[in-house]
Image: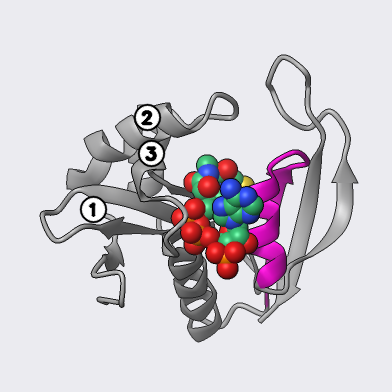
Amino acid sequence: MKNKLNVQIRPALLADLDALVALEARTFAYSRMGRASFRRLLLSPTAHFHVATAVDGTLLGYYLLLTRSNSSRWRLYSLATSAEARGVGLGRALLEHALSYAREAGASALSLEVKSDNKAAIALYQSLDFAVVDLLLNYYDDDQHSDGYRMRRSL
Ligand SMILES: CC(C)(COP(=O)(O)OP(=O)(O)OC[C@H]1O[C@@H](n2cnc3c(N)ncnc32)[C@H](O)[C@@H]1OP(=O)(O)O)[C@@H](O)C(=O)NCCC(=O)NCCS
């Protein structure tokens, strides 16, 4: 899929592994996924992984949805855009893609966890109708053991 950002959003491939690991290392100082986790998830039938790439193929972002057996409630496990590509609508485009993808695959709701001080992500989620449903005390593995929110929306 191409959009007005001239970015392609497509299913992730094993060939994206190096770029995903590099983006993750630049993006997250906490709860960061390592190479082995990315590889496992890229091959997992319960993980729905999409990447956003520029015209030259550069990886600009990704999202990862996880499904559970016997549940139509899916989880947005991760969403990130590269620092150089932020603030121009790519995070929103990825999240809208994830919502459509999950809805078309039969999901009834999408939940996620977000650090309680992650203003940009929370604003993005709220603008697409996610609401806080739980406070997760000491949820993150950073030095402060930061709190998180669980957010959810129906599809
Ligand atoms: C959160 C993240 C994905 C947003 O991506 P992005 O490409 O910058 O997002 P967009 O440009 O599409 O902006 C979408 C909305 O996010 C919110 N937003 C983005 N940057 C913001 C900022 N610096 N401050 C406040 N809100 C912000 C706004 O609501 C914005 O909508 P608007 O442009 O209509 O005001 C990106 O900042 C990121 O990858 N952060 C690091 C990883 C992360 O925290 N992921 C989420 C983990 S739960």
> Which residue in the structure is indicated by mark 2?
36
Residue that lies at the very extreme toward the front in this rendered image: 87
Q: Is residue 95 left or right of residue 74?
A: left
Residue positioned 70% across, 47% down in the render: 119
Please state, as top left, top right, bottom left or bottom right, where the N terminus lies in the image: bottom left
Which residue range is magenta in the image?
Answer: 109-127
Q: Earlier in the sequence, mark 1 or mark 3?
A: 1
Residue positioned 83% across, 59% down in the render: 132
**Magenta stretch contains residue 67:** no
Give amino acid for label 2: Ala
> Which residue in the structure is indicated by mark 3?
38
Give amino acid for label 3: Phe
* Helix, strand or loop for disc 3: helix
Is mark 2 in CB contact (under 8 Å) with mark 3? yes
Q: What is the CA distance from the residue labelled 2 to the residue labelled 1?
A: 14 Å
* Helix, strand or loop for disc 2: helix
Where 97 falls versus 21 (above or below)? Answer: below
Instruction: Please name whichever residue, 76 or 84, is drawn nearer the observer in this view of the structure.
Output: 84
Q: What is the CA distance from the residue labelled 2 to the residue labelled 3?
A: 5 Å
> Which residue in the structure is indicated by mark 1?
13
| Residue 129 seen in the current view | yes
